[in-house]
Image: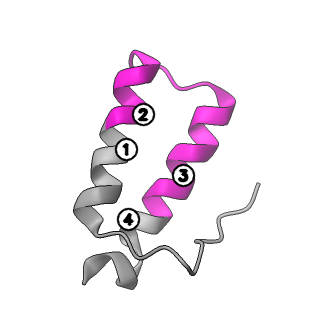
Amino acid sequence: MSTTVEPSSERSAAEVNEEIRALWLRSGGTLSVEQREEYQRLVMEWASPEARR
């Protein structure tokens, strides 16, 4: 599993947060292994300095 944030991502923290919320809604509150990996990637992207601009 890679936790590398895509350098080309220029989304704001709000945009990434919206995707995180959508992931939780789609999952019904229980994440599969694939969804957990996606969640971790999104959280890393959300926390990156680039998303904080």
For label 3, the SS is helix
Packing grade of label 1 (10 A; few <14, some 14-19, many >=20) is some
User: Pointer 1: what residue?
Assistant: 20
46 shown above or below 28: below
Amino acid type, label 2: Leu
Image marks 1 and 2: residues in contact by CB distance under 8 Å: yes
What is the CA distance from the residue labelled 2 to the residue labelled 3? 11 Å
User: Pointer 4: what residue?
Assistant: 46
Which of the two discs, 3 and 4, labels the residue nearer the N terminus? Answer: 3
Q: Quadrant of the C terminus?
A: bottom left
Which of the two discs, 2 and 3, labels the residue nearer the N terminus? Answer: 2
Q: Residue furthest right?
A: 1
Image marks 1 and 4: residues in contact by CB distance under 8 Å: yes
Q: Residue furthest top?
A: 28
For label 1, the SS is helix
Is 36 colored magenta in this rendering?
A: yes
Which dot marks residue 5? Answer: none
Amino acid type, label 3: Gln
Is 34 colored magenta in this rendering?
A: yes
Which dot marks residue 23? Answer: 2
> In the rendering, at what x and y percent does residue 21 appear?
31, 38
